[in-house]
Amino acid sequence: MPGLPRLILPLAVLGAAVWYVRGVRRYRDPIRIPPQDAGAVLSPADGLVCFVRRIEGGEVRVETLAAPLSTRDLTGADVWEGWLVGLFNGPLDVHFAYAPVGGTAREVEHVGSRLNVSLGGAGLLLGRPADLLGTRGAVENERHVTTLETPGGDVGVTLVAGAGGLNAMTYVRPGDETRAGHKLAFLEEGGLVLLTLPGHAVPQVSVGDRVTGAETVVARL
């Protein structure tokens, strides 16, 4: 096959790039310096802001769905009033999840799934935001829930698996005290990261923003 030698080098480069992303880059652990800002809520992960939605009566409305979604189904926790911020943590992002605020871990729970399905299309990988709330995976996939109790109200972080599963290593147990910016978990495959905030919080990010875990202020209490 005369064209075969010309294909070997590109294929070798592609294979090396895939190995680097999956075998080296996703395990990197950069130093993060959380801002000393009273009332700040820090991003729980690196990624792309996909939605910022109001929670009313324990539900979130999605334009593409006929019925609202329950916050219990989405986040694994009961949130009656507040805000829901969704971040997509992609394959090139740092895969650690961080505590957005200081507080006490009141609830730490894993919610399994029979089948994990894809969260979204290729546009997310290219940096184009998509409202993942309208996808089956946002509700049905495996997830890990951490609820932090703070003087300003409960703040929750829910890690939602993509099609490859969650494969998360968690570092916090119920009753543990956390500081803003401390590591909560490692998401080997990335996925959707949901942040729940009390009703009086003021979001500081919009759809399409890129955020840095433990450093970007995403809301204020």
Image (cartoon, rainbow, N blue to C red):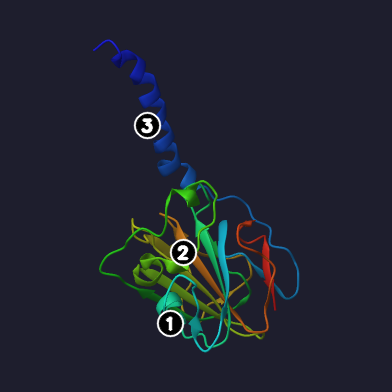
Q: Is residue 8 above or below residue 198?
A: above
Look at the image and tell me whether residue 160 can be seen. Answer: yes
User: Secondary structure under badge 3?
Assistant: helix
Q: Nearer the viewer, residue 1 or 180?
A: 1
- Left/right placement of residue 142 relative to residue 154 reads left
The residue sitting at 40% across, 37% down in the picture is: 18
Which residue is the site of mark 3? 15
Q: Position of residue 121 (x, y in %)?
A: 42, 52
CA gap between label 2 and label 1 equals: 16 Å
Q: Which mark is residue 114?
A: none
The residue sitting at 44% across, 48% down in the picture is: 122
Q: Is residue 54 above or below residue 43?
A: below
In terms of image quadrants, where is residue 221?
Answer: bottom right
CA gap between label 3 and label 1 equals: 41 Å
Which residue is the site of mark 1? 72
Structural crowding at the residue carrying mark 1, measured as other residues with C-alpha within 10 Å and reported as few (<14), some (14–19) or many (≥20):
some
Q: Is residue 60 above or below residue 43?
A: below
Identify residue type, mark 2. Leu
Q: Are marks 3 and 1 in contact (CB under 8 Å)?
A: no
Q: Position of residue 180 (x, y in %)?
A: 64, 69
Which label's residue is closer to the chain start, 2 or 1?
1
Identify residue type, mark 1. Arg
Residue farthest toward the right in the current orientation of the protein: 37
Which label's residue is closer to the chain start, 3 or 1?
3
Nearer to us: label 2 or label 1: 2
Which residue is the site of mark 2? 132
- Left/right placement of residue 25 relative to residue 114 reads right
User: Secondary structure under badge 2?
Assistant: helix
Look at the image and tell me whether residue 45 can be seen. Answer: no
